Image (cartoon, grey):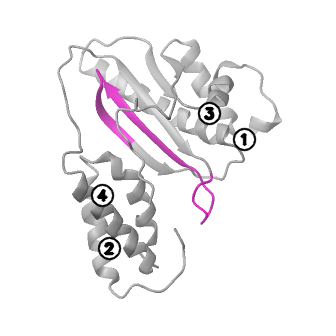
C-alpha cells in the first residue's frame, strides 16, 4: 500500500470503520494482518486506503461462515504455528510476525504484528516469529497449569522456514545472527528443556489452523 496519495474526504468514517473491523478480529483472525496494515493510516489516509477497507469488507461478505470452530476432541496438546512476511511492506520494509496457538486443534490465541526493526533475511524474520510464538506457548502452558488441566509435552512449534529451524538447533553463533542472539538463546533454552519441539511445515499446504494473513 502507498503512504501518500489523494486525500480521502471523510477520515472520521474511515476511523469508525477501522475500529469496527478491529473488533471483528476477535472472531475473525483471518483479517488480523489486513487490519494491522490499514490501521497505520488513521491520521494521514488517502483514497487507496479507503479502497483497501472496501476490499476487506467484500472479503468478509463473501466468507460469512469463516470464523472459529471449537470441537471437543478430548485432546489437550498445545501447538503453535508461526509465519513472517519478510520485508513485504514497501513503506518501511519491516516484516510482520503472525502466529496462532491451538489447544487440541482449537485456536485460542493469535497475533499479527509488525516487527520492531528491519531484518536482512527471511530466516531472521521467521526466527523472530518463532521467538514470539514460543513466549506465547510458555504463557499458555502456565495458564493450563494454573487451571490444573493435563496437557501433552513437549508443545509443538510449526515453522515453514528450514533456515530458521536450523538456527534453533545449531549451537554455533556467528556475526550474521548476532542481532537476534537473545531470541536464539531463548528458543534454544526451551528446546533443551523439552518444553517445545520444532517441526517443519510446508506453507503451500492447507495445514494452518487459521489463515491469519490476508493480502490487500
Who comes first in sequence, dot 1 or dot 2? Answer: 2
Pair 1/4: label in front: 4
- In the image, residue 10 sits, relative to residue 88, either above or below, namely below
Pair 4/3: label in front: 4
Residue 152 is inside the magenta segment: no
SS at mark 3 in the image: helix
How far apart marks 4 and 2 lie (CA) works out to 19 Å
Who comes first in sequence, dot 1 or dot 4? Answer: 4
Q: Residues within 10 Å of mark 2 (few under 14, many from 20)?
A: some
Across and down, in percent, residue 201 comes to 51, 26
Across and down, in percent, residue 100 comes to 39, 36
SS at mark 1 in the image: helix
The stretch of residues the image draws in magenta is 87-110
Q: Which of the numbered marks, if any, corresponds to residue 179?
A: 1
Q: Residues within 10 Å of mark 1 (few under 14, many from 20)?
A: few
Pair 3/2: label in front: 2
Residue of label 3 = 183
Q: Residues within 10 Å of mark 4 (few under 14, many from 20)?
A: few
Pair 4/2: label in front: 4
**Do callouts 4 and 3 mark residues in contact (Cβ within 8 Å)?**
no
Residue of label 2 = 15
How far apart marks 1 and 4 lie (CA) works out to 38 Å
How far apart marks 3 and 2 lie (CA) works out to 35 Å
Amino acid at each position: 500500500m502507498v503512504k501518500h496519495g489523494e486525500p480521502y474526504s471523510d477520515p472520521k468514517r474511515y476511523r469508525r470503520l477501522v475500529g469496527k473491523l478491529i473488533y471483528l478480529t476477535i472472531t475473525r483472525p483471518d483479517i488480523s494482518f489486513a487490519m494491522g496494515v490499514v490501521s497505520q493510516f488513521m491520521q494521514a489516509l488517502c483514497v487507496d486506503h479507503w479502497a483497501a477497507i472496501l476490499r476487506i469488507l467484500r472479503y468478509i461478505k463473501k466468507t460469512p461462515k469463516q470464523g472459529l470452530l471449537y470441537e471437543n476432541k478430548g485432546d489437550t496438546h498445545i501447538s503453535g504455528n508461526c509465519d513472517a512476511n519478510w520485508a513485504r511492506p514497501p513503506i518501511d520494509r519491516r516484516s510482520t510476525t503472525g502466529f496462532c496457538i491451538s489447544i487440541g486443534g482449537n485456536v485460542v490465541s493469535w497475533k499479527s504484528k509488525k516487527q520492531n526493526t528491519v531484518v536482512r533475511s527471511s530466516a531472521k524474520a521467521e526466527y523472530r516469529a518463532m521467538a514470539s510464538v514460543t513466549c506465547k506457548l510458555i504463557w499458555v502452558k502456565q495458564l493450563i497449569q494454573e487451571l490444573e488441566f493435563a496437557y501433552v509435552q513437549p508443545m509443538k512449534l510449526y515453522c515453514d522456514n528450514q533456515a530458521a529451524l536450523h538456527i534453533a538447533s545449531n549451537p554455533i553463533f556467528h556475526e550474521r545472527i548476532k542481532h537476534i542472539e537473545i531470541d536464539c538463546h531463548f528458543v534454544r533454552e526451551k528446546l533443551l528443556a523439552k518444553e517445545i519441539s520444532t517441526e517443519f511445515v510446508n506453507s503451500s499446504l492447507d495445514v494452518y489452523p487459521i489463515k491469519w494473513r490476508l493480502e490487500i
